[in-house]
Image (tube, grey):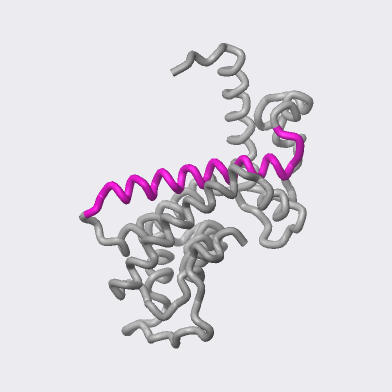
Amino acid sequence: MANVSYRDQVLRLREDAIVSAVNRLLATKGYDLMTVDEVAAEAGLAKASLYKHFTSKEELAAAAMVRVLERATEQVDALDAQPQRPVIERLEAIVRWTLEVQLAGEMPSLPSQNSRLTDALRGHAAYMERLVVLSDKLGDWISRAQSESTLNPALPPEMVLFTLFARACDPVLGLLKAGGQHADQQIIDWLVATTFDGLGTGARRAVAAPKPAARSVKAVRAR
């Protein structure tokens, strides 16, 4: 492995500090309220130094999302290294991890509708590559769980995937936490249970298969 120069090490550490600052601000304030000035102050840098690494607010958000996708993929790979563990338990475990990260204030919060940011993310190669990798890995788990009937096989796979992704920004978590009446673990247990078992008290009701036939996760991952 080639030695990394001192200058490159400094640049890497500075970039890590910037991305960590962005992640914290996105988790606590959200994208719309976060400013580049705040990011620079949080990272302990001059604004001009920050712009040497990232040229826009959109690039900062993309970098934070790349980091969280990398962390999620590492979690999936660790769970994949446990072949004896049922795939439905792996899906539950990744949702649980997502909720824990959100409770820890480390999950970036992005607006659901923002054309400029959406366009920037779609054009960000590193973000799209990691999103595709994670979607494929989760899509494989979803397909296997549906074939084993531990997930409803009538549901479109992409709907299941998007539902799992949605847990990363579930407002119920924050509302219950802010109420101060329930322990963190209890809140997470409830959200994992409702994600996979719904709100009913009995057996889950069958859902009619969609028409036309649903596309696979891979067919919609890059939209």
Q: Position of residue 218 (x, y in %)?
A: 50, 62
How many badges with numbers are in the image?
0
Does residue 59 show up magenta in the picture? yes
Does residue 56 show up magenta in the picture? yes
Q: Which residue is drawn at 28% across and 72% down?
A: 148
Q: Residue at x 59, y 42 (%)?
A: 126
Q: Quadrant of the C terminus?
A: bottom right
**Taking 162 as reference, is 184 above or below it?**
above
Q: Residue at x 56, y 18 (%)?
A: 9
Where is residue 46, by image quadrant?
A: top right
Foreground residue among 222 and 179: 222
**Please, which residue is most extreme toward the left here?**
84
Where is residue 175, by image quadrant?
A: bottom right
**Taking 210 as reference, is 143 above or below it?**
above
Q: In which quarter of the image is the N terminus?
A: top left
Residue range (magenta): 54-83
Task: Determine whether, in the image, residue 198 is placed left or right of residue 53.
Answer: left
Q: Where is residue 59 in the image (x, y as percent from the top left)?
A: 70, 41
Task: Determine whether, in the image, residue 208 is placed left or right of residue 45.
Answer: left
Foreground residue among 211 and 191: 211
Determine the main secondary structure of the stretch shown in magenta.
helix
Q: In the rendered image, is residue 30 in sight? A: no
Q: Position of residue 79 (x, y in %)?
A: 32, 50
**Taking 19 as reference, is 128 above or below it?**
below
**Taking 206 as reference, is 177 above or below it?**
above
Task: Determine whether, in the image, residue 56 is placed left or right of residue 99.
Answer: right
Q: In the rendered image, is residue 207 in sight? A: yes
Q: Which residue is drawn at 67% across and 48% down?
A: 29
Q: Position of residue 101 (x, y in %)?
A: 47, 48
